[in-house]
Amino acid sequence: MEKDTVLLDVEKYNVLRDFKEYIEKGHTLEVNNSRYNSYRRFITTDEAVKIVVKERELIVAELEKENTDLRLQINTLENPAPKEITINDLKKMSYWEFRKWCKS
């Protein structure tokens, strides 16, 4: 064998050849791996940009919703609902506490 010779399986060679051809044509490789399935396909660069923009919009929408929820939680912690005062609470108040309560 020669010094620079590499032996490849025909299927692996075809995969590498297809990859080279698609990349030279300006395509992008999309790989999706999940727990149950995985696939590889070549898409145009425009399609790849559309996918990225769509994913970004979904992430931004989720973050805005989470931000709104967190701001509501902060507001409720900073401004809790006023406690309702009962007659028994009024009876337990001192004169100065009662006067302060009346002014507020």
Image (cartoon, rainbow, N blue to C red):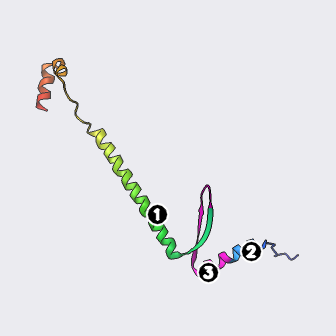
Say above or below: 69 vs 61. Answer: above
Specify few, some or many for label 3: CA neighbours under 10 Å numbering under 14, 14-19, or 20 or more: few
Q: Which mark is residue 55?
A: 1
| 68 sits to left or right of 83 | right
* Residue under the point 74% across and 71% down: 12
Q: Residue 5, percent across and down?
A: 82, 75
Q: Nearer the viewer, residue 55 or 98?
A: 55
Q: Nearer the viewer, mark 1 or mark 3?
A: 1
Q: Which residue is mark 3?
A: 24
At horizontal 52% and vertical 75% (from top left) the residue drawn is: 45
Amino acid type at image mark 3: Glu
Give the side of residue 2 with respect to residue 88, left or right. right
**Left or right of 92: which side holds 31?**
right
| Tag 2 residue | 13
- Judged from the image, the secondary structure of the residue bearing numbered disc 3 is helix
| Mark carried by residue 76 | none
**Quadrant of the rendered image containing residue 6:** bottom right
Note whether 46 is above or below 73 in the view shown.
Answer: below
Which x, y percent locates residue 3? 84, 75
In this picture, which residue range is highlighted in magenta? Answer: 18-37
Q: Residue at x 46, y 63 (%)?
A: 55
Q: Of the residues shown, which amino acid type is indicated by label 2?
A: Tyr
| Along the line of sight, the residue nearer the viewer: 94 or 54 | 54
Q: State whether residue 70 is above or below residue 12.
A: above
Is disc 3 in contact with disc 2, using a CB cutoff of under 8 Å?
no
Residue type of the residue flagged with mark 1: Glu
Q: Is residue 79 above or below residue 95?
A: below
Helix, strand or loop under label 1: helix
x and y percentages locating residue 43 in the rendered image: 56, 74
Sequence-first tag of 3 and 2? 2
Magenta includes 29? yes
